[in-house]
Image (spheres, rainbow, N blue to C red):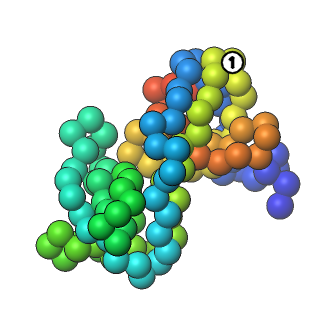
Amino acid sequence: MNPISDPHVRFGRVIKDYLTAYPEPLTALKGESLTIVKKDGEWPGWVWCLKDNVRGGWVPEKYIKAIGDQGFMICDYDAAELSVSIGELVTILKEESGWFWCRNKDGKDGWVPIKHISSA
């Protein structure tokens, strides 16, 4: 499908630079187990999780079925963040708890805080 003709795809312009804080993002597949460490105070709806007690990352709470401090992924997930610069045009593919999942002109995808993008 051509993304231009997809009514669910939006475009946005970056209004504030964002540099990813996590160069090695957590990825998890549906059914995988993660350890839930804490909720995010700044970004409600996100929890810090560890995979194999090694690699950590923020995961949307609704992507996890929690049983105590154990979480099971209910869908595939990638915690990649996208570094962006003021003026850059991005394609907004989804929205989750204060963040957009975006694609830049080079075809790279990642999370960007909504407050850094003016959506069109």
User: Going 49% across and 53% down the picture, which residue do you hit?
Assistant: 25
Secondary structure type for disc 1: loop
Q: Residues within 10 Å of mark 1 (few under 14, many from 20)?
A: some
Taking the view exactly as shown, the residue that stands out farthest to the bottom is 31
Residue 110, how many percent across, how many down? 58, 46
Residue 64 in sight: no
As displayed, is residue 94 above or below residue 68? above
User: Going 42% across and 81% down the picture, which residue do you hit?
Assistant: 31
Residue 15, how many percent across, how many down? 58, 18
Quadrant location, the C terminus: top right
10 lies left or right of 97: right
Identify the image quadrant of residue 67: bottom left
Residue 36 in sight: yes
Identify the image quadrant of residue 34: bottom left
User: Going 30% across and 67% down the picture, which residue do you hit?
Assistant: 53
91 lies left or right of 39: right
19 lies left or right of 14: left
